[in-house]
Image (tube, rainbow, N blue to C red):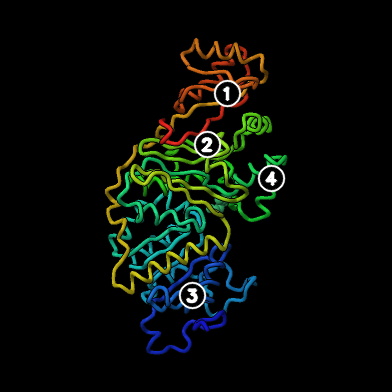
Amino acid sequence: MDRLSLTHPAHADRTEFDRNEVRIALLGCGTVGSGVAILLLDSASSISARSGAPYSLEAIAVREAEKPRAREIARELLTDDPQRLVADPAIDVVIECIGGTGEAAHLVEAALRNGKHVVTANKDLVATRGPELRALAAANGVTIAYEAAVGGAIPIVRTISESLAGEDILEVGGVLNGTTNFILSEMFAGSTYAAALARAQALGFAESDPTNDVEGVDAAHKLAILAQLAFRRALHTAQIPRLGITKLRPDDITLAKRLGYALKLIAAARSDASLVTPAFVARTHPFAQPVGPQNCIRVTGRSSGSLTFAGTGAGSAPTASAVIGDVVAVLRRIAAGRHVGSDASSASLAPLGPGLEPSIALRRVVRLESLRDARPAHAALAEAGYAAEAIDGVPAILTERLDGARAARLSELLASHHIAAPSVIPLWEDASEGA
Ligand code: HSE
């Protein structure tokens, strides 16, 4: 029987044993936070046994303490004063499940400055301020852990930062956003974009503002986090060349089917380039496999080869599972008398200048309106110095590998020859395929 239960008052029944326990505060009790609260309360004895450190969930900061909740949580645990918790000397670990870069950022910073370990699911925050927060944690002798920020329960953050710490990583990324993968899966099955987005929102995969999902910002946040770890570069979301799925048309889905490709939102980074873009993907490639809200993440190392991780990348339970994994890791380190410190050298991450970094050079499929345009389009591209080939029986041309700037000129160039090219979509190729 668990020592803590949903109705256990926070400070009741203190024993000699309890005084050695680690004290945890949870900030936020929404989709992810409520899943975390339930696991911490219901599974206290097994989590404590696995981590070697008994703990107590001391308080949960919520916006409205009196609001009715799907699952009864003892009123004594709830507070609407998160500032008090991050300043409270009795709190050892702060779990941040508020999200965003506003209040959550101030609270995480304050918690780290006050010497508390932080576990967060906040991808926006880690993507935009990760290097700085890791340096702050290291300076204060504490940990900031964020496995839940990327790919739900898929164990990718710790895999890159610990298991692959000695690896020369060549490429990282894949299908990192569940909402867009769900929308594209539905569109492949005949749904309209609008109907598919509405379903994704109703099912709870989408962000509160789904613009971040469909414009590729969410995928770019996750990619920035992975790239920071994989390449030790202070890559920020805003620097990643990014295109979402809002400009895709039903004709692009039709073209993918005719060519025998999947169409996915791919987010990928190499040591010197990155991008987020819809891309055609060979049906046999791992990135073509995720359906609905699933993610597929691949890390390719010089010695390790390609390692592929797949699973549900969004939702309360998988994300809460990743948070609890981080909590156990933090508790173990506290029990062993040491802090994580794996990112202690974050301050020395290679900085990037402002502005976009280079996009990964990929071949492009130029969709034409008519098969009759293929020959003149081919000639126009050749005249402008682009190597390209017609695709048999399909109104499309396949170019050589192009960087973002050269690819951006294609439609305009064809328009100047009175040839309509309604879309230009990259064809995904792994780093090992020789880009
Ligand atoms: N909106 C995100 C997604 C949630 O669709 O992947 C998980 O980060």
Name the N-terminal-most of marks 1 and 2: 2
Residue 27 in sight from this viewpoint = yes
The image's mark for residue 366 is 1
- Image quadrant assignment for residue 84: bottom left
Residue 80: x and y in percent read 52, 70
Q: Which residue is mark 3?
A: 59
Identify the element where label 3 is drawn.
strand
Amino acid type, label 4: Ala
Name the N-terminal-most of marks 3 and 4: 3
Left or right: 204, with 389 as reference point: right
Instruction: Identify the residue at horizontal 47%, vertical 63% (top origin).
Output: 323
Name the N-terminal-most of marks 3 and 1: 3
Amino acid type, label 1: Val
Quadrant including the C terminus: top left
Instruction: Identify the residue at horizontal 55%, vertical 10% (top origin).
Output: 379
Q: CA distance from mark 3 to mark 4?
A: 38 Å
Query: Compared to 386, does 20 lie above or below?
Result: below
Q: Which residue is mark 2?
A: 277
Asked if ligand 1 lies within 8 A of label 3, the reply is: no
Amino acid type, label 2: Thr
